Every structure is written in structure tokens, then in C-alpha cells.
């Protein structure tokens, strides 16, 4: 495990044109594998196809979650909050079919400064594979800050990997995951320096699920639940009571 005291390499990774280009090139394949999860995130929102609303996608990257929601709700608009201009530039290419229904806003989830999103209506918020990049104290405060900005009745849905709460469960998850990806064990023991850096960045702040559910509840969210789970990947969230 990396030492949490080490300098955070997250920005260096995501603000690299090379990483962003590779991430975008693999978007079709990755999103194909996650179609069910992306669609479920969209369907957890209590809207129908005729509803006009605005949602915010935190750590939006190249827009996987946003595009799933924009497909599900033809009258919705997306605000993609993302701190990497390189990821946003790649996302702009993938979002061409949605022109006029989305915009990127440069926003750093670490900063706690929501001014870049002033004036944006938070009818709902989603995040996909981004919250695990934040230290725990920021995860917790982000949930509260988001709650304050959500419209009454607004949902927040988060799709993210989580860490196993103990080594026994960790080895069960790894054993089962490896059955689905037979070369995973070989890949784990043959990472080059760049792959190792990406891996360490991926797991650095990854946390078990339970405390994160508690932070949502403490922030005030209702109907907090794990709406989908497969081994280390989960969809959880809740809504702001009216
Ligand atoms: C694994 S990618 C996921 C992108 C996209 N949400 C998806 O599901 O494909 C993680 C994203 O989180 C963004 N991110 C990481 N830390 C961030 C921060 N502090 N503020 C805003 N975005 C951040 C990265 O730039 C990257 O686009």
C-alpha cells in the first residue's frame, strides 16, 4: 500500500494529455462493460423522459455518466465538473452528439470552493469513479457541501470502487475478480513504473463502503442505500428530503 503521507500524484496523472488520450480511447470498451451500472445510475433519478432538469457530474472525466444520463433523459442538461482540462478536452470530442445540452466547468473537488458552480441548479448530482481519489476528510465534507447545494428532493448517486474492510474479504474479492480476468495475477506482478503509479493512485484513498454510507446519512441524505454492488464496485446514494 502507498503511504498516504506521500505527495499526491493524482493531478499529475489526470492532467496528463497522454493519460487523458488513452482514457478516451478506451471509453467505448469500458463503458460497454459498465452499461448496466451507468444506466442504473440514470434510472435511480426520479425523473421521466419529459422532464427538464440539470444535473452535475463530479469528476466527470470524459463524461461516461453524463452521456448515460443525457441518453436516458432527452430534456436534461449536464454540468460536467472536472479539474483536468486534458480530460475535458477529450470529453468534448465524445460529447459532440450532445452539443447544447452540456458544459464543462473547471472544478477541483479537493478545494472546497464551489464558486465555479455558482448559478448552477443541482436538481441531481452523480459521480462515477472519481470520489475514491479524495482523502477521507474531503469525501466527508464534499458530501455535506453537495447536500447544501442540492435542490430539495434532489438525488446524489455515486458509482465507485471500495476497499475491502479486511484482508479475508480482500482475498475473496481478488480471487473472484481473477476468475473473470485470468491474466490479472500476472499483470499485478509485472507492472511497469507507470502502471504501478496509476495503481497506487487508484488505491491511495480508497475506503470501505460503510463509513461512506454513514457520511451520507450524517450529511442529511435520506434513502441512503447500496443500490448495486459487485465485489469491490458499488453504486450508493440517497436524496435530500423536501
Ligand atoms: C477514473 S476517472 C473517471 C472519469 C469519469 N467520471 C468516468 O466515469 O469515466 C477519474 C476522474 O476524476 C477526476 N478527478 C480526480 N480528482 C479530482 C478533483 N480533485 N477534482 C475534480 N476532478 C477530479 C479526474 O481528472 C478524472 O477525470
Image (spheres, rainbow, N blue to C red):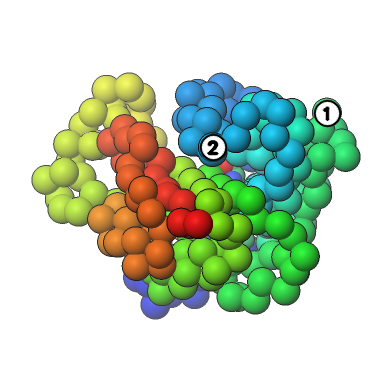
> Residue 193 placed where, x, y %?
49, 53
Residue 106 visible at all = no
> Residue 46 placed where, x, y %?
54, 37
Q: Residue at x 81, y 33 (%)?
A: 98
Res 97 quadrant in image? top right
Q: Is residue 110 left or right of residue 140?
A: right
**Pointer 1 residue Cβ closer than 8 Å to ligand 1:** no
**Label 2 packing within 10 angstroms: few (<14), some (14-19), many (20+):** few
Q: Residue at x 64, y 51 (%)?
A: 123
Q: What kind of element bears circle 1?
A: helix
Earlier in the chain: of badge 1 and badge 2, it is: 2
Res 148 quadrant in image? bottom right
Q: Nearer the viewer, residue 49 or 198?
A: 49
Res 168 quadrant in image? top left
For disc 1, the marked residue is: 97
On screen, 72 above or below 223?
A: above
- Disc on res. 46: 2
Alpha carbon distance from label 1 to label 2? 24 Å
> Residue 31 placed where, x, y %?
57, 28
Q: Residue at x 36, y 48 (%)?
A: 223
Residue 232 visible at all = yes
Q: Is residue 48 left or right of residue 79?
A: left
> Residue 175 placed where, x, y %?
21, 32
**Label 1 packing within 10 angstroms: few (<14), some (14-19), many (20+):** few
On screen, 104 above or below 35?
A: below
- Disc on res. 70: none
Q: Residue at x 32, y 22 (%)?
A: 180
Amino acid at each position: 500500500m502507498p503511504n498516504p503521507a506521500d505527495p499526491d500524484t493524482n493531478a499529475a496523472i489526470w492532467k496528463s494529455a497522454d493519460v487523458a488520450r488513452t482514457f478516451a480511447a478506451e471509453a467505448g470498451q469500458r463503458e460497454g462493460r459498465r452499461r448496466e451500472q451507468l444506466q442504473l445510475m440514470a434510472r435511480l433519478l426520479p425523473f421521466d423522459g419529459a422532464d427538464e432538469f440539470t444535473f452535475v457530474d463530479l469528476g466527470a472525466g470524459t463524461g461516461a455518466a453524463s452521456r448515460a444520463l443525457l441518453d436516458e433523459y432527452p430534456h436534461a442538461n449536464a454540468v460536467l465538473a472536472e479539474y483536468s482540462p486534458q480530460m475535458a478536452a477529450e470529453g468534448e470530442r465524445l460529447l459532440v452528439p450532445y452539443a447544447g445540452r452540456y458544459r464543462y466547468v473547471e472544478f477541483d473537488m479537493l478545494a472546497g470552493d464551489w464558486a465555479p458552480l455558482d448559478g448552477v441548479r443541482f436538481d441531481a448530482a452523480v459521480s462515477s469513479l472519481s470520489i475514491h481519489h479524495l482523502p477521507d476528510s474531503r469525501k466527508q465534507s464534499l458530501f455535506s457541501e453537495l447536500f447544501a447545494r442540492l435542490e430539495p428532493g434532489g438525488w446524489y448517486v455515486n458509482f465507485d470502487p471500495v476497499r475491502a474492510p479486511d484482508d479475508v474479504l480482500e482475498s475473496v474479492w481478488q480471487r473472484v475478480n481473477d476468475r473473470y480476468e485470468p491474466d490479472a495475477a500476472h499483470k499485478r506482478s509485472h507492472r511497469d513504473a507507470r502502471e504501478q503509479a496509476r495503481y497506487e493512485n487508484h488505491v491511495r484513498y480508497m475506503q470501505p463502503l460503510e463509513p461512506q454510507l454513514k457520511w451520507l446519512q450524517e450529511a442529511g441524505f435520506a434513502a441512503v442505500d447500496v443500490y448495486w454492488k459487485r465485489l469491490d464496485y458499488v453504486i450508493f446514494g440517497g436524496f435530500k428530503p423536501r
